[in-house]
Image (cartoon, rainbow, N blue to C red):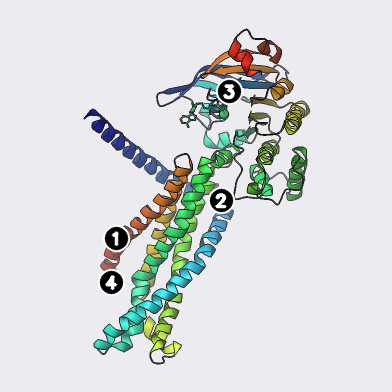
Amino acid sequence: MKSIVDTFFNFLLNQLYRIGQFGLFLQHSFSSLFSTQSEWKETAKQCYLIGYKTLPLVGITGFIMGLVLTIQTRPTLSDFGAESWLPAMVSVSIVREIGPVITALICAGKVGSGIGAELGSMNVTEQIDAMEVSGTNPFNYLVVTRILACAFMLPLLTIYNDIISMLGSFMGVNIMGEVSIRLFFASALSEISFLDIFSSLIKTFFFGLAIGIISTYQGYYAQKGTVGVGAAANASVVISSLLIFILDMVAVQISSLFS
Amino acid sequence: MNQNETILRVKNLSKSFGEKQVLSDINIEVLKGETMVIIGMSGSGKSVLIKCLIGLITPDTGEINILNNDLLSLKKKALNTLRTKLGFLFQSAALYDSMTVQENLAFPMRNNFDLSKAEKLTAMEKVLEEVGLAGTLQQMPAELSGGMRKRLGLARTLIMQPEFIFYDEPTTGLDPITSKEISELILQVQEKYNTSSILITHDMACAKLTANRMIVLKDGKIADEGNYESLAKSPISWIQNLFQ
Ligand SMILES: Nc1ncnc2c1ncn2[C@@H]1O[C@H](COP(=O)(O)OP(=O)(O)OP(=O)(O)O)[C@@H](O)[C@H]1O
Ligand SMILES: [Mg+2]
């Protein structure tokens, strides 16, 4: 009996400890964002790495998504005789919802796990300590740069994803009957407002922030040993994916206030 | 400068992890230009001790004064400035896996704006030459052997010509010939730049060559101290066994 109580208390203490640690981590991250000794060069490098490495994956998924969505929506619309709405309908779902979320999930999987594993193994093999003793602030150099890079790159990747999805959709529309690309885009963009694009950019900025913060935190405080590295990579993906959905829900509520 | 100036003074240093007392009541003084060798069995707390001395681990109690700085009261910025004058060789070498040899060596110099690019490159080539790794600038650490990694770690420690160096087992995992060369290099650095250092080792040939004074650590306490000759003749049998 006692051991169960003990285990429970240990678990509780551990969770409280993690929450406190995360709180400090957040506070430290945000205060470092505005510190004078920012690592702009390294941030740019991380932007390049994060953006460039996910470009093909985001492109392929985006293309397939647009194509599939179009093919699957067509029968429903033609039942109502509203086939001419197809481009508008697909592009609205892509720009408002599917583009941002899918791009963010892909980045959570690819970039988040990468950051979690990289920082985790740097922690385990004392590389972070080595930076610290060589007079570089590892928090600014490793954590802040990656958080910023994720937050900057996600909106850009989402725009890229949206465009490629539209091209996929254009292909989908063209499988049955011919539509010129001009007509397609005119029709597709007719239903998209500035607010849609603006809120999607803001939303994905926060998705990126979430991916960056969660995965750097998991990596930076990984438990020692190779198990710790795996766990950090895993937790980065799981928690940031979950967070993306939660943030998306919040974003829907907020943007419905404005429209 | 007074030759007998104390450059590192540690007073009543203690550290425990949870219930486990790893260091208790450690007192050490190192003079300018002196090499202090620490020996002791595995797990006796040697690595934890020097990590405390460079501020990677915060001790529970005690005072640390190094190069006229009260280490434990330093702010982040002052600590980083101080650290550019200190060198630290990790037991695991702690090379940056994602960087080339050149980038590894450049890292400690990245906040040094006094040197030009060309001067930095010359310094890198020189220090690689000294540790016997000439011509490896473009390789990745993963392509190096265990001993080469160790020597690269040493090169990265030496490149800034620190005033005080902590070596954690600089010759472990090297063949006897390379070990001897590294020990001689450490001695040369000390003589040439009047560097002070603390050196942890299990390699008695290295200790014999480099030590001015030695400390024996056991279960986190200083069990004995003296010079190489006096400790080698210690009447306590386990200390004598360390010298075999
Ligand atoms: N971060 C830590 N958390 C908990 N315990 C630790 C930590 N670091 C070290 N220890 C413990 O402190 C003790 C001393 O470790 P240390 O690494 O200083 O040994 P050492 O004397 O350097 O041994 P070796 O010669 O094998 O390198 C060990 O029992 C170790 O388990
Ligand atoms: Mg050790």
Quadrant assignment for the C terminus of chain B: top right
- Image mark 1: chain: A
What kind of residue is marked 4?
A: Ser
Mark 4 = which residue?
Answer: A259
Q: Is residue A258 left or right of residue A44?
A: left
Q: Earlier in the sequence, mark 2 or mark 1?
A: 2
Mark 2 = which residue?
Answer: A39
Q: Nearer the viewer, mark 3 or mark 4?
A: 3
What kind of residue is marked 1?
A: Val
For label 2, being within 8 Å of ligand 1 is answered no
What kind of residue is marked 3?
A: Asn
The correct choice, above or below, for B127 with respect to B215 in the image is: below
Q: Separation of disc 4 and disc 1 at Cα?
A: 15 Å
Q: Nearer the viewer, mark 4 or mark 2?
A: 2
Q: Separation of disc 2 and disc 3 at Cα?
A: 31 Å
Q: Residues within 10 Å of mark 4 (few under 14, many from 20)?
A: few
